[in-house]
């Protein structure tokens, strides 16, 4: 049947389709047309289609959205990761990309990898002029320009939210650079595919290096400090927040210490509606040492968290010698983040950890110490609908109901069923904007 005769481009049918709508409805068929879902259930199954994907009992989830993933860096380093490196030979060092061809190759490699994992959206957290002289070449303005070029060429197989960076990655930033940067124009793009609406600010470092800014000193008596520079670090940090809000930017702050998280939340609280009215809201990246009092204030102020369960898994042992056992045990309070109602996304921070969300979900299940369908569904929302809200895009992506973007992943088994590692579940296919961007060789399907 030709494209023009069919009512749908693709009908997906014959399995459990988790829509992740407000009632967590499960349906058995979806019809896709022009990049969107046009029908579900019996109405979808009845439509003629150019292509039918027979699920054969497989499971469909909304496409995975990794709310904190350095795709350019991942593509340049792959298959090498910092944690759980499985790549052959030595971990790459120094300059990873130098030319436009290198940059395109890095992004294209990352996109192929992400498609094979079912990842249909991600946040690229920090690219811009602050890193023009950066060691790897992965984070400078040239990489942002490459993003825009590939975007305009229609080459993307994942939707991207890109945070601009006006200081150094994991390093210092000058107030004046951030002020000038957030006020500088953003390239024209289709925000459904490349949304450049936010800014990344590094408040501090990480606890194992004693560079997280903490209220109570480390065992050696130091406290870490802010990375923001101006007349005074605190004034510089507040000035950056104010300038970003003035420019209408979503703000993501790398903050791991309780004192830096407090400073960020206080700054947002002091701006009131000017801060809370920005689409997608603001959030803390990592939040290792967040406590109950801060979480309550964050829930109140609508400040989210992008959390990394695999990093938590790996760094606990490094944290203990500098913070002591009890503070280490209290770090990354995922259960409390969830119960307090803080908008918490579950993310990889690849290439620090694997971009494989299945491994990340398993790590989160271990952190929570429970395994029920409800807990699994809740965690899976944190890689689909919750990051869609962080992207200010929940009205058009993240759930599988008519009118929404046709972004989905086909899995061999149902990941909401307890008792089996999610990492053991195969990804059979990935659809982004109604287009099949990955299909495993043996996926059963018919024309
Ligand atoms: Zn990161």
Image: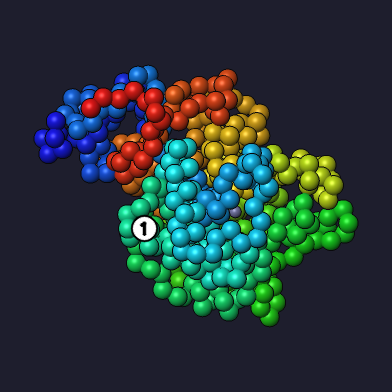
Q: Quadrant of the N terminus?
A: top left
Q: Quadrant of residue 353?
A: top right
> What is the x, y in percent for residue 112?
44, 44
Q: Position of residue 169 (x, y in %)?
A: 62, 63
Could you tell me which residue is drawn at 63 percent across and 71 percent down?
A: 173
- The quadrant of the rendered image in which ligand 1 is seen is bottom right
Q: Which residue in the protein does label 1 denote?
A: 151
Q: Position of residue 19 (x, y in %)?
A: 37, 32
Kindly identify the residue that appears in the image at 55 percent across and 73 percent down.
178
Relative to residue 239, is residue 112 depicted above or below?
Answer: above
Seen from the viewer's position, the closer of residues 332 and 350 is 350
> Is 348 situated above or below 96?
above
Residue 154 quadrant: bottom left
Say whether mark 1 is within 8 Å of ligand 1.
no
Is residue 29 visible in the rendered image? The answer is no
Relative side of 119 to 350, left or right: left
Residue at x 48% of width, y 67% of height = 142
Color encoding of the figure: rainbow
At 33% from the left edge and 38% from the top edge, which residue is drawn? Answer: 436
Q: Horizontal placement of 256 versus 101: left or right?
A: right
User: In the rendered view of the protein, which quadrant contains the C terminus?
Assistant: top left
Q: Which of 151 and 57 is in front in this view?
A: 151
């Amino acid at each position: 049947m030709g494209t023009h005769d069919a009512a749908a481009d693709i009908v997906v049918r014959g399995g459990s389709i988790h829509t992740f709508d407000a009632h967590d409805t499960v349906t058995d068929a979806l019809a896709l047309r022009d990049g969107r879902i046009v029908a579900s259930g019996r109405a979808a199954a009845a439509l003629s289609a150019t292509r039918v994907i027979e699920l054969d009992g497989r499971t469909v989830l909304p496409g995975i959205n990794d709310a904190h993933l350095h795709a350019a860096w991942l593509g340049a380093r792959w298959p090498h990761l910092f944690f759980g490196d499985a790549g052959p030979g030595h971990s790459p060092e120094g300059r990873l990309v130098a030319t436009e061809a290198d940059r395109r190759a890095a992004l294209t490699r990352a996109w192929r990898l992400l498609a094979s994992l079912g990842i249909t959206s991600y946040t690229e957290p920090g690219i811009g002029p602050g890193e023009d002289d950066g060691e790897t070449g992965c984070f400078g303005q040239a990489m942002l320009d490459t993003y825009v070029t590939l975007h305009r060429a229609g080459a993307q197989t994942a939707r991207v939210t890109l945070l601009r960076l006006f200081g150094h990655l994991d390093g210092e930033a000058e107030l004046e650079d951030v002020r000038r940067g957030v006020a500088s124009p953003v390239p024209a793009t289709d925000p459904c595919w490349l949304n450049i609406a936010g800014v990344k600010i590094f408040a501090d470092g990480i606890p194992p290096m004693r560079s997280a800014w903490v209220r109570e000193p480390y065992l050696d008596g130091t406290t870490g400090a802010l990375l923001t520079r101006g007349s005074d670090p605190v004034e510089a940090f507040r000035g950056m927040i104010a300038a970003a809000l003035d420019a209408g930017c979503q703000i993501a702050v790398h903050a791991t210490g309780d004192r830096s998280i407090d400073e960020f939340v206080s700054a947002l609280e002091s701006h009131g509606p000017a801060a809370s009215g920005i689409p997608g809201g603001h959030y803390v990246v990592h939040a290792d040492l967040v406590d109950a009092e801060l979480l309550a204030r964050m829930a109140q102020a609508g400040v989210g968290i992008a959390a990394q369960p695999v990093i938590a898994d790996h760094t606990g042992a490094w944290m203990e010698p500098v913070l002591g056992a009890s503070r280490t045990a209290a770090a990354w309070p995922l259960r409390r983040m969830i119960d307090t109602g803080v908008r918490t996304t579950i993310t990889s921070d690849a290439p620090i950890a694997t971009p494989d969300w299945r491994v990340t979900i398993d790590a989160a299940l271990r952190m929570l110490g429970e395994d029920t369908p409800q807990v699994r569904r809740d965690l899976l929302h944190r890689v689909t609908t919750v990051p869609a809200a962080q992207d200010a895009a929940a009205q058009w992506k993240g759930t599988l109901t008519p009118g929404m973007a046709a972004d989905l992943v086909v899995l061999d088994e149902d990941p909401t069923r307890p008792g089996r590692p999610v990492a053991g579940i195969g990804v059979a296919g990935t659809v982004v904007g109604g287009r099949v961007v990955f299909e495993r060789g043996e996926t059963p399907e018919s024309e």
